Image: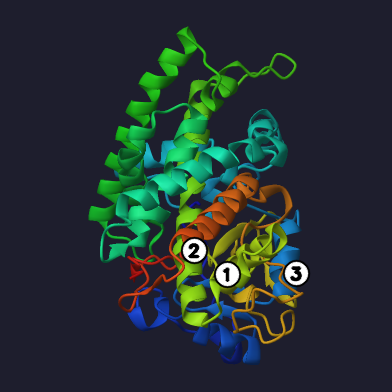
């Protein structure tokens, strides 16, 4: 989730291929789909003026670029800062930068392959499926805690706690630490806002430092007394004599904690909103395991939790008639790709019964979300248990999205069920 930096100015872009949309404009981030509709109709390959780099909005291009090994999530393994004109690291974000130094999301092979191999076992489908009973119990505990209320913010009371507690327990942290982990994570995620302020950078950096201090103490304990948890697994995994360093374990744990709840929280809120606004009887959406899975996939497609993912060109190359230089950033618009009318029939309609429900919300290629199997189970359980327990659920007021365009999620979701 590295911040977007345009390394070299690009000026020779035809006007008809330029597009303008301010990511901090409420009119945009409350409804980016109007912008996407225009892109699909006019130019799905375009230069986004505010970001200063080329972007791709079609399903075909986004899917292809996610798998194209000529592009990567890091660039300094093939070029120097001086060569690229990249600014020097800022001292006031040193702690935040340290959390990203060994992040799976920002590494390329062979470092990525090594780290993912040592972590992947905990997230394979057969393993996370064993967590389903725990997730069901937790979902019902959350509903029990607010069922007697007249109205509740479903994000705060239901969507956010479940994935935060589950990933904390998987890693080996106590469930009661989840609220603090969420607070640190939310402050760090603010770094991905467009035009982030210095005050936000300082706050995110302090959150990162506090997060690392907390984990360092826990890692020291696990070194002395390993347990049956992911943290101990990462510390003791041995691949031909190769083990993860404390810094690598810390970066991976923070990534899993942050990414391990972010997409699930947003998809839960966005999905409940879409279901309630669709007018479809929720009973029909969760009548079978197969239909429950299809409904979750449509929620991921229709209102994706992540809308913009970036890559670096790893060498000078041409793509889609565009000449790119080594180090140029390209934006892959996941939310727009999921609404591509060339790929999906009636793309702007929420249809959990569609037969063309593939999506790119979890990415693709070597950076396909490692936590996708867990997220899908959490979403299947959250939706099905919520509407089973509260079949008369309805919106209590209009909802608004957060001012963090990349991460497309609701500020709150006020609901009633009487």
Whole-number angstrom distance, CA of label 3 to CA of label 2: 49 Å
Q: Is residue 292 visible?
A: yes
Q: Quadrant of residue 415?
A: bottom left
Image spot of residue 361 (x, y percent):
61, 62
Q: Residue at x 75, y 16 (%)?
A: 240
Asked whether 410 or 156 is in front, the reply is: 156
Q: Secondary structure at mark 3?
A: strand
The disc label shown at residue 318, or none: 3
CB under 8 Å between callouts 2 and 1?
yes
Farthest residue toward the top?
224
Tell me which label, 3 or 2, sits earlier in the chain: 3
Mark 1, residue position: 283
Asked whether 5 or 277 is in front, the reply is: 277
The disc label shown at residue 387, or none: 2
Image spot of residue 149 (x, y percent):
26, 60
Image spot of residue 253 (x, y percent):
49, 33
Whole-number angstrom distance, CA of label 2 to CA of label 1: 7 Å
Q: Residue at x 47, y 84 (%)?
A: 20
């Amino acid at each position: 989730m590295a911040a977007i930096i345009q390394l070299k100015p690009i000026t020779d872009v035809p006007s008809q291929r330029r597009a303008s949309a301010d990511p901090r404009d409420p009119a945009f981030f409350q409804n980016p789909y109007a912008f996407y509709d225009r892109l699909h109709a006019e130019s799905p390959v375009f230069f986004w003026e505010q970001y200063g780099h080329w972007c791709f909005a079609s399903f075909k291009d986004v899917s292809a670029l996610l798998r194209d090994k000529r592009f990567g999530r890091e660039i300094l393994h093939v070029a120097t800062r001086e060569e690229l004109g990249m600014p020097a690291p800022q001292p006031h974000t040193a702690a935040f930068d340290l959390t990203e130094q060994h992040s799976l999301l920002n590494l390329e092979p062979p470092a990525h392959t090594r780290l993912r191999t040592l972590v992947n076992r905990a997230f394979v489908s057969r393993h996370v499926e064993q967590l389903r009973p725990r997730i069901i119990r937790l979902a019902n505990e959350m509903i029990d805690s607010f069922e007697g209320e007249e109205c509740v913010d479903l994000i705060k009371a239901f969507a956010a706690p479940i994935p935060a507690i589950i990933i904390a327990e998987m890693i080996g942290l106590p469930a009661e630490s989840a609220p603090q982990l969420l607070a640190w994570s939310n402050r760090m995620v603010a770094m991905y806002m467009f035009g982030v302020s210095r005050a936000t950078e300082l706050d995110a950096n302090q959150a990162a430092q506090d997060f690392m201090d907390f984990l360092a103490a826990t890692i020291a304990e696990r070194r002395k007394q390993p347990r049956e948890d992911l943290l101990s697994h990462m510390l003791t995994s041995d691949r031909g004599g190769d083990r993860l360093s404390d810094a690598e374990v810390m970066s991976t744990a923070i990534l899993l904690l942050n990414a391990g709840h972010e997409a699930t929280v947003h998809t839960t809120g966005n999905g409940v909103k879409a279901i309630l606004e669709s007018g479809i009887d929720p009973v029909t959406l969760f009548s079978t395991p197969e239909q429950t899975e299809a409904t979750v996939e449509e929620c991921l497609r229709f209102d994706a939790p992540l809308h913009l993912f970036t890559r670096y060109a790893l060498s000078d190359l041409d793509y889609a008639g565009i000449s790119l230089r080594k180090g140029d950033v390209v934006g892959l618009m996941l939310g727009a790709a999921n609404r591509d009318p060339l790929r999906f029939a009636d793309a702007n309609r929420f249809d959990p019964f569609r037969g063309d429900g593939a999506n790119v919300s979890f990415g693709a290629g070597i950076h396909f979300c490692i936590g996708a199997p867990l997220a899908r189970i959490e979403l299947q359980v959250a939706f099905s248990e919520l509407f089973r327990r509260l079949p008369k659920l309805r919106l209590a007021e209009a909802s608004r999205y957060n001012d963090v365009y990349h991460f497309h999620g609701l500020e709150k979701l006020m609901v009633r069920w009487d």
